[in-house]
Amino acid sequence: MLAVYGVVGDQRRWLLALARKAEEERWWASADHRDHLEALRIIADSASEVFDYAPAVIPPMLRTPSYALAFPCAPGVSPARQRAFDAESRKALTSLRGARYSFVVDEAALRRPMGNTEVMADQVEWLIGMVRVNGLDLRVLPFGRFGCPATAFRLYRFAKGAPLVHFGDHLTSVLLDDPVDTDIYESAMTALLAHALAPFESVPILEDALARLSGA
C-alpha cells in the first residue's frame, strides 16, 4: 500500500517500523512523538490534496505561536511536549509542496477566547493575511449552517491510492485507511465544503471578528 502512495525505499521501511512500534505502545508515552509528525509529513508530501478541519478551535497548522502558547495542555502532557507538537504542526504549513490544502474553520473558533484579546486579534489578523496575500484556501463555517462534526480530522487524497484519514492530538494519533471508515470522513468533508463560505466570502467574517476583538 505504501508503494501505491509513492512511499518507497528507506521511508517505507521507517514507516513500517514505526507502525509496528505503535502497535506495542502508546506513542505519546514515548519520547519519539516527533517520529509521528515526521510520518505525517511524509504522507502529506505524497498527497495531492489535504483537507483539514477542527471544531471550535483553530487547526494546529494555522495557529500563531501566541495562540498555541495560550492553548491549554492536555491532561498528562507536559507543556514542553505540547509546544513542540504545535511548533512542528505550524512548520508543516511553511513547507507545503505539491498538495492542495483546504481548511475549514468553525466560526466558534473565532469567538472562543484563547489567551487574551490581543492573542485572538493577532491570530485572526494572521488568518486574514494568509487568505489575502498567500491565497490560503481557508473557509469559515458560519453559525446557522450545518451541524459540524465534533471531531477534528485531516483527510489525505492521492493521485494513486485510496484516501487516508488522520485524527489525533497530543495524546492520540490514529490513521484510517479502511474505505468503510474513510468514506464517512469523505462525506463529512463534502458536507463541510458545501456549507462553508468560500475564501473571499470568509474574509468579511474574519474582519468582523477582528473588529470586535480590536474594540474589546
Image (spheres, helix red, strand yellow):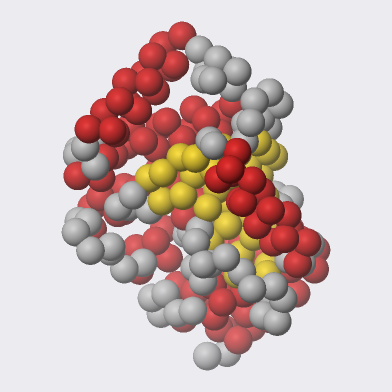
User: Where residue 160 sits in the image (x, y, percent)?
Assistant: 68, 23
Closer to the camera, 146 or 103? 146
Horizontal and vertical percent for residue 168? 41, 51
Which residue sits furthest front?
180
Direction top: furthest residue: 9
Q: Is residue 13 left or right of residue 132?
A: left
Residue at figure coordinates x 73%, y 66% from the top left: 196
Q: Is residue 34 above or below residue 16?
A: below
- Report which quarter residue 204 is drawn in: bottom right
Q: Relative to residue 45, is residue 102 depicted above or below?
A: below
1 on left or right of 136? left
Image label count: 0
Residue at figure coordinates x 61%, y 64% from the top left: 105
Picture residue at 44% right of the left edge, 16% below the top: 12
Front one among 84 and 30: 30
Q: Looking at the picture, tell me which residue is in the foreground, 116 or 50.
A: 50
Q: Quadrant of the N terminus?
A: top right
Residue 58 visible from this viewpoint: no
State the image quarter where residue 191 is shown. Answer: bottom right
Q: Position of residue 71 (x, y in %)?
A: 36, 67
Task: Please say if 36 is above or below 151.
Answer: above
Residue extending farthest to the bottom is: 216
Residue 116 in the image: x percent, y percent? 41, 79
Is residue 113 among the parts visible in the rendering?
A: yes
Residue 22 vertical position relative to residue 142 in the rendered view, above or below: above
Residue at the (57%, 84%) spot, across then down: 214
